Amino acid sequence: MVAQGTDTTQSRLPSLTGMRFVAAFLVFFCHSSAQAFYADDELAEATMRVGIGFGWMGVAFFFVLSGFVLTWSARPEDSLTLFWRRRFFKIFPNHFVTWFAAVLLAIAAGEGFSVTQTGPSLVLVHAWVPDMEVINALHIPSWSLSCELLFYAAFPWLLRWVGRIRPAWLWASAGAVVVLIVAVPLTAQVLLPQLPRVPWFPMSVWHYWAVYTAPPVRLLEFVLGIIMARIVISGRWINLGRGPAFLTLAIGCVVQWSLVPSPWAMVAPTAVPLALLIAAAARDDARGRVTRLGSRPMIWLGNVSFAMYLLHLLVLHYGHLLLGPERRWSTLSAVGIQAALLLVTVALSGLLHRFVERPAMRRWSAPRRRERLGLLAETVGDAITTRRMS
């Protein structure tokens, strides 16, 4: 049975906003598990194994969500310049602040770094380089922003392309994208070199880069999000609720954990469940079925999640240095330390959101006289003509 068309012209997505915080927390948990807080070696290993999967899933969520939300909220009056301007000032103010904070903290801690390794991360091109010392230089989480820049650059043309797909073929198109996502690890394994090896995983740098950090590869998840948004907007969504969608995600997590560490575990097991969960939550939000994820506290946390994503590893790493880089704690103490560092991260994220992200968006995201014509206006107009279908 196919759901009726959904009018999204005035609908917000509070549940998806709350879910952004959950995804950011999963990434926090991943990097926290890698900090070796636990004195119990077996618990530390088990926590890291679970945390790695959570981190991969959190990043994939943001990539699928980006495509979905940009399509859902696309503005018919936008020009290319206006769209890209908003995206630039959404990303770069927070990025510049946290990047320079990372530089200052590294200097204060006596940690060395080179300009050739860290320079690409300042302008967000480092994820294009198949070199772990460049990808993970200084400010590790920013690699995903390299991918987001490609997403934003390509979005107007991708939206036009997806907008031309007949509604009856949208599910088949989503399936084709999923097939490509699943084929990436196999292609990398067959075509790319086995050396050099990643220091912390039994795979080559080439495999890690091609499957996980290469922006053109992660573009597939973004496209999947665009297609899923069109499925919901055009009334082709199946009546799959959030509960069953979450169940598919739980199954995907089990599959992912059974494959860690492996290139097959990074994206493929959770791409479909995440796409289903995002679409199910958006459809319910559009129909007014608000859950606790859409509560005011969760919406606030979701709004600061971008700042949290950029700040959390700085808090974890340098917080651990302050407490003693070689120290390990009992389970209860380690959990308490992680909780305290999470609170510090959320507090700092709120400040970054309040005093950098929001003012920058208000001041610079739109010119005084908006441009009314452009490719994006045309493509968005094509893509949302089906919004009032019933």
Image (cartoon, helix red, strand yellow):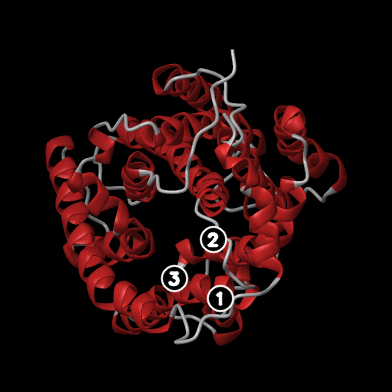
Residue 261, by quadrant, is top right
Which residue is situated farthest in the right direction here? 191
Residue 206, by quadrant, is bottom right
Give the SS element for disc 3.
helix
- Estimate how packed mark 3 is, as few (under 14), some (14 to 19) or many (20 or more) residues with alpha carbons within 10 Å: some
Residue topped by disc 2: 75
Residue topped by disc 1: 82
Q: Residue at x 49, y 43 (%)?
A: 61
Residue topped by disc 3: 90
Inspect this view and state whether residue 196 appears. no
Spatial separation of the CA atoms under disc 2 and disc 1? 10 Å
Answer with mark 3 or mark 1, whichever residue precedes in sequence: 1
Q: Which residue is drawn at 55% across and 57% down?
A: 74
Spatial separation of the CA atoms under disc 3 and disc 1? 12 Å
Q: Nearer the viewer, mark 3 or mark 2?
A: 2
Answer with mark 3 or mark 2, whichever residue precedes in sequence: 2
In the picture, measured across the screen, residue 204 lies left or right of residue 122, that is right
* Residue situated in front as seen by the camera: 42 or 355: 355
In the picture, measured across the screen, residue 333 lies left or right of residue 86, that is left
